[in-house]
Amino acid sequence: MIKVIKIGGNVVDNPELLKKFARDFAEMPGMKILVHGGGVMASQMQKAMGMVPQMIEGRRVTDEETLKVVTMVYAGWCNKNITALLQSERCNAIGLSGADGNAIKASKRAPMKVQTGEAGEYTMVDYGYVGDVTAESVNAKFLYKLLERGITPVLCAINHDGEGQLINTNADTIASSVAVAMANYKYRTPREVCHRCEECTHCSDDGRLTHLVDLIYCFEKDGVLYDKDDDSSVIPQIGPEDFEELKAAGRVADGMIPKLTNAFKAIDNGVRKVIIKHAMNLGVQIGTTLIREA
């Protein structure tokens, strides 16, 4: 079993919450990969430097100067602070950007049409040094070699294009892409002997094995809420049809839509299940589980 866990800037920016999360994460048995954002701190840093953060549809427009700031924040302070906390909890973690070990490549996003008004008006937007990742652009072999040696990768939202350019990438997308890549990575046991057990899903034709992979998104709510103003209205389980109905009713909106869209794509491509929960509840059975069919 491999667990891919993603935390956002709201966790990274909260010292007490982050310390509690690090303890729970370290105590979680088995192979695991941590992916983190840090958008809140990046915006604060930009403002402190006299820059104005520009966000369009929840995405940060990243020019050359902004890229320097987000790299310092994501790959620097946030990444190394989390790694140090995990080390203090006896979790042998290694902080990585996508450029380190060629862990993840990203392709720069082309200018795209973005709706700017309710009347259906669109504007071409160039997000700058913002990119997209896929499962194919994740170096699953490299990450698995670390896991095999008892080393936990901690991945930030900075990747590279393979041509010397750093790229700012959405952490939710990184987490889902990493989860799919690890779910489809074929490995052999040390003795190259097939032994069916709960640690693997099946054997491929060439005798290699694949791991079960769960994807966990941690944020500031206990799960997906039916009523955004009622923290107790957690929806325990959501299937694809439920998702469409919740969107149509306006129960799921804004930043939760791309999060759930990424989650269902991950399930369709080999991830066993996706759980959305509060970072404080990592070690308990509270949250929303996404499944193929409700």
Image: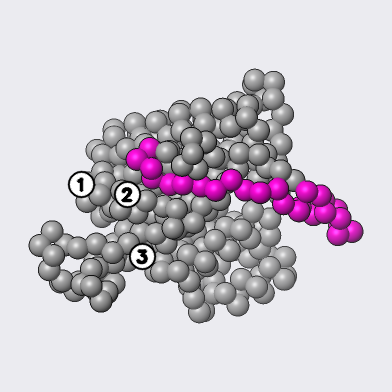
What residue sits 39% from the left and 31% below the top?
Answer: 80
Q: Secondary structure at mark 2?
A: helix
Q: Position of residue 163 (x, y in %)?
A: 49, 39
**Quick one: which residue is furthest to the left in this view?**
191
Given residues 290 and 222, the one toward you in this image is 290
Distance between mark 3 and mark 1 Cα atoms: 20 Å
- The residue indicated by pointer 3 is 184
Residue 5 vertical placement versus 285 (above, below): above
**Quick one: which residue is furthest to the right in this view?**
119
Residue 89 vertical placement versus 148 (above, below): above
Q: Left or right of 231: which side holds 16?
A: left
- The residue indicated by pointer 2 is 143
Q: Secondary structure at mark 1?
A: loop
Q: Quadrant of the N terminus?
A: bottom left
The reply to whether dot 1 and dot 2 touch (C-beta < 8 Å) is no
If you read the primary sequence from the N terminus, does the residue marked by circle 1 or circle 2 appear first? 2
Distance between mark 1 and mark 2 Cα atoms: 10 Å
If you read the primary sequence from the N terminus, does the residue marked by circle 3 or circle 1 appear first? 1
Residue 96 figure quarter: top left
* Residue 114 falls inside the magenta stretch: yes
Q: Which residues are magenta?
A: 100-124
Q: Left or right of 202: which side holds 76?
A: right
**Crowd rating for badge 3 (residues with CA inside 10 Å; few <14, some 14–19, many 20+):** many
Disc 2 marks which amino acid?
Leu
Q: How is the image coloured?
A: one colour
- The residue indicated by pointer 1 is 149
* Residue 216 falls inside the magenta stretch: no
If you read the primary sequence from the N terminus, does the residue marked by circle 3 or circle 2 appear first? 2
Q: Nearer the viewer, mark 3 or mark 1?
A: 3
Can the viewer see residue 168 in this picture? yes
Residue 121 figure quarter: bottom right
Disc 3 marks which amino acid?
Asn
